[in-house]
Image (cartoon, helix red, strand yellow):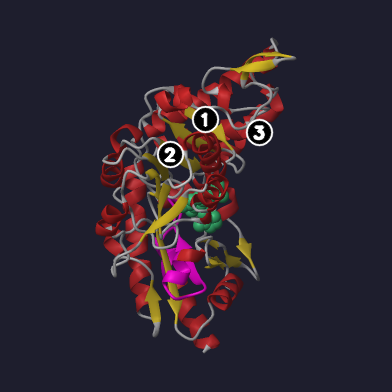
């Protein structure tokens, strides 16, 4: 189904689609949800699409020749088509459903990495990465004897492209980086980094978990070989995510999980693989979750991603101002103008954990901790930070509330 006429963007109207946001907690305080970097909430449309599948059309996919299986298989494949359209992939075969960003990156490390990476090869990451884009590569390095290297950040908190340049060599086999940092909120220049990596013939992987939900994604213009993202960060359910891979590379890759669906023939002597994308979707996939993700994409397509991005800019700019007014506050990462819709900060002499606990008592959900980016926190000389991360249903009024609450909380904790 092609997207309909886009709605005019209005966060107040949008909120009506999200039942979970319309509640009070902790002594009648309206819930303010600013933990969207971890996971987003679900509109009725997504809940209803999943519910409808369970109520009317659920069966396993690509197996039974019966009505229910045909219905659910068609809906599952429709979801793949929606993903393809949303990220501008050239073919549905390039869209593999996985369990999430973590599942996607592990798939690449196992399937492509084990076959192509040798002792002495180098895997280049950045200091911005989430553990999901570090540990699978460290595991690959342990298995193969490859070496993992990290591109450093500049004083301004951006990737140091000169350092990247100095690290690239004929030994660089893989370059993998986030398109948006889940801590600093900065966007990385994906096409430029990809072009640099390609000068030494490296495979390019983009961890797009924090950008696909918020920014327009065009995998063809990025020029990377793989991108990974998660359904639950873009209004969809948990348990489903996407690996987009260049078809010519996927065709050459061996599946890392074996089982049902991924084969063509199995005999007592061995097996032959199936076609794409089934080759990488062994076993029963997250059927209803993929259908939910398809519905989330249709919801986002009705709105216009550019407007979501603009709205988040307004919120982040105001949050930046309000946090900066607090004595001893330090915002991590670049200036408000060039960041995606999240802001991480520390406040001198006050524990991030305590801030988050007291904000929660006032109904405001933020995240405190290392946000699964321990190397970055270590580099910044801190153990933890607070993070407020926004999405299309958040309002300026909520940001003002957080600013006021933060002042009170810090006063109390000092
Ligand atoms: N990459 C980035 C950049 C992320 O932000 C996350 C999750 C992941 C990978 C992993 O995604 P998953 O769906 O496979 O778990 N980030 C966060 C976060 O910032 N807070 O909680 C989860």
Secondary structure of residue under mark 3: helix
Query: Sequence-wise, which precedes: disc 3 or disc 2?
Result: 3
Q: Look at the picture and state if 219 lies above or below 126.
A: above
Residues rendered magenta in the picture: 376-401
Q: Look at the picture and state if 151 lies above or below 303.
A: below
Q: Quadrant of residue 318?
A: bottom left
Q: Are marks 3 and 1 in contact (CB under 8 Å)?
A: no
Residue at 54% x, 76% y is: 355
Q: Can see residue 401?
A: no
Q: Is mark 1 within 8 Å of ligand 1?
A: no
The percent position of residue 388, horizontal first and vertical second, equals 46, 64
Q: Which residue is mark 2?
A: 227
Query: Sequence-wise, which precedes: disc 3 or disc 1?
Result: 3
Residue at 33% x, 35% y is: 218
Q: Label 1 crowding class (10 Å Cα cut-off): few <14, some 14-19, many 20+?
A: many
Q: Which residue is mark 3?
A: 51
Q: Which residue is mark 1?
A: 96
Q: Can see residue 184?
A: yes
Q: Nearer the viewer, mark 3 or mark 2?
A: 2
- Specify whether 116 is left or right of 63: left
Total numbered circles: 3
Q: Nearer the viewer, mark 3 or mark 1?
A: 1
Q: Is mark 3 within 8 Å of ligand 1?
A: no
């Amino acid at each position: 189904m092609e997207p309909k006429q886009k709605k005019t963007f209005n966060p107040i109207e949008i909120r009506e689609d999200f039942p979970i946001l319309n509640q009070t907690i902790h002594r009648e305080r309206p819930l303010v949800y600013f933990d969207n970097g971890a996971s987003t909430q679900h509109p009725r449309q997504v809940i209803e699409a999943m519910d409808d599948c369970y109520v009317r059309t659920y069966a396993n996919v690509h197996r039974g020749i019966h009505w229910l299986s045909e219905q659910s298989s068609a809906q599952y494949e429709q979801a793949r088509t929606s993903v393809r359209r949303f990220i501008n992939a050239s073919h549905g075969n390039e869209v593999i459903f996985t369990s999430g960003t973590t599942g996607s990156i592990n798939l690449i490390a196992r399937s492509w990495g084990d076959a192509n990476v040798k002792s002495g090869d180098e895997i280049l990451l950045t200091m911005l990465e989430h553990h999901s884009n570090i540990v699978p590569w460290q595991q690959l390095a342990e298995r193969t004897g490859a070496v993992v290297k990290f591109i450093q950040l500049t004083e301004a908190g951006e990737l140091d492209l000169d350092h990247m340049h100095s690290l690239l060599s004929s030994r660089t086999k893989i370059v993998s980086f986030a398109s948006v940092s889940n801590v600093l909120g900065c966007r990385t220049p994906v096409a430029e980094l990809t072009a640099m990596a390609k000068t030494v013939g490296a495979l390019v992987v983009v961890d797009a978990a924090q950008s696909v939900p918020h920014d327009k994604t065009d995998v063809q213009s990025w020029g990377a070989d793989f991108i990974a993202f998660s359904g639950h960060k873009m209004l969809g359910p948990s348990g489903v995510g996407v690996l987009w891979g260049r078809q010519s590379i996927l065709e050459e890759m061996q599946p890392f999980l074996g089982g049902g669906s991924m084969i063509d023939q199995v005999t007592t002597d061995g097996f032959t693989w199936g076609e794409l994308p089934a080759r990488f979707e062994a076993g029963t996939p997250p059927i209803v979750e993929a259908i939910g993700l398809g519905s989330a994409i249709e919801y986002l397509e009705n709105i216009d991603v550019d407007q979501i991005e603009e709205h988040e800019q307004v919120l982040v700019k105001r949050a930046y101002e309000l946090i900066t007014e607090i004595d001893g506050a330090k915002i991590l990462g670049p200036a408000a103008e060039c960041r995606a819709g999240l802001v991480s900060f520390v406040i001198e002499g006050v524990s991030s954990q305590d801030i988050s606990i007291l904000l929660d008592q006032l109904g405001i959900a933020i995240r405190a901790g290392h946000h699964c980016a321990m190397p970055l926190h270590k580099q910044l000389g801190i153990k933890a930070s607070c993070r407020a991360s926004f999405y299309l249903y958040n309002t300026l009024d909520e940001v003002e509330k957080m600013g006021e609450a933060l002042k009170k909380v810090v006063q109390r904790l000092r």
